[in-house]
Image (cartoon, grey):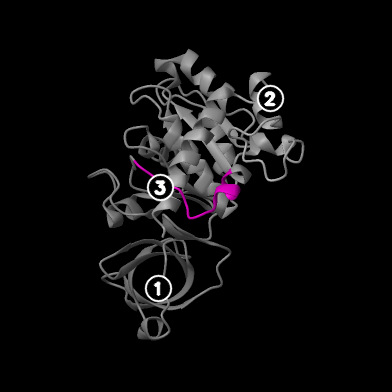
Amino acid sequence: MRGRIIKAVAGFYYTYAEDGQVYACKAKGIFRKEGIKPLVGDEVLMKVTDEKDMEGNVESILPRRNCLTRPAVANVDQVFVVFAAADPDPSLLLLDRFLVRMHSYGLPVVICFTKADLDPAKAEDLCRIYRDSRCRLIVSSSRTGQGMKEIRSCLAGKTSVTAGPSGVGKSTIANALQEEIRMETGEVSRKLGRGRHTTRHVQLVPVGPDTFLVDTPGFTSLYLPQMEEDELKKCIPEFYPYEGKCRFPGCRHVNEPSCAVRDAVVNGKIEKERYEGYLTLMEELKEILSHRW
């Protein structure tokens, strides 16, 4: 049968098969011999070895569309990053680090600001800061239902990596979506043990027809990807309209004179929070590069 790996733990690859069941599969030895490791998100061909205990073998891995390293997951369509407007207070620097990393993967990003009912003004301000980031912005509240229809629409038919700090409501959104779909997810949840603890492993959660969320452990820190200083500015979409308009070629937009980006910040065309975040990330990157040698 054809299936998709939705969780990998202790050498078992839990595979959501085309018959709607989840099988605990082992990978054939040929994968180890060829240095190939199955990943969550892989589309595979599998063979059932024990129907009673729902066990099988992964026979082959179908070609991957893409592959991320952190989290380690394959065949992703977009990234669904979740930050709360309040409780916990959002860290803009953490979000900026995340956006730089996702830009390096070349994946579309949806930013969802949850718990909007706790601080509507803050949610609105966050949207202002990231309005030109070329990310889709959604404001939501699980308590009032705000934004849930838009979330369902943007996730439908796609595999979306969900990420964000602990306690912002990623699992709440996933559970709400599961409650509303017309498919048998109860057996999937029991097989994976969902609901007992917060997420500990990367896993695909089926929440609708051809719709999966890649549930990841909450993170409190995220390092910048390996890059040179000149590459960082290319990860800030707000800077794109001003590239080539600075006085000096190769301007890093830090302290060079006649910088079009800095002028845009002063004139309110680039949000100062985004620029200040860029300066902080540049200092972090310089520190990282100084220890490379």
Helix, strand, or loop for circle 2?
Answer: helix
Helix, strand, or loop for circle 3?
Answer: loop
Q: Magenta includes 46?
A: no
- Say which of 53 and 62 sits in front: 62
Label 3 is placed on what type of residue?
Tyr
Which mark is nearer the camera, 1 or 3? 3
User: Is residue 255 visible in the rendered structure shown here?
Assistant: yes
- Say which of 177 and 36 sits in front: 36
Q: Is residue 208 left or right of residue 193?
A: right
Residue at 40% of width from left, 73% of height from top? Answer: 37
Mark with earlier residue (1, 3) = 1
Mark with earlier residue (1, 2) = 1
- Say which of 177 and 247 sits in front: 247
Q: Position of residue 74 (x, y in %)?
A: 49, 62
**Magenta segment range?**
221-232
In this view, the residue farthest toward the front is 257
- Provide the residue designation for mark 1: 37
- Mark seen at residue 240: none
Helix, strand, or loop for circle 1?
Answer: loop
In this view, the residue farthest toward the left is 196
- Provide the residue designation for mark 3: 223
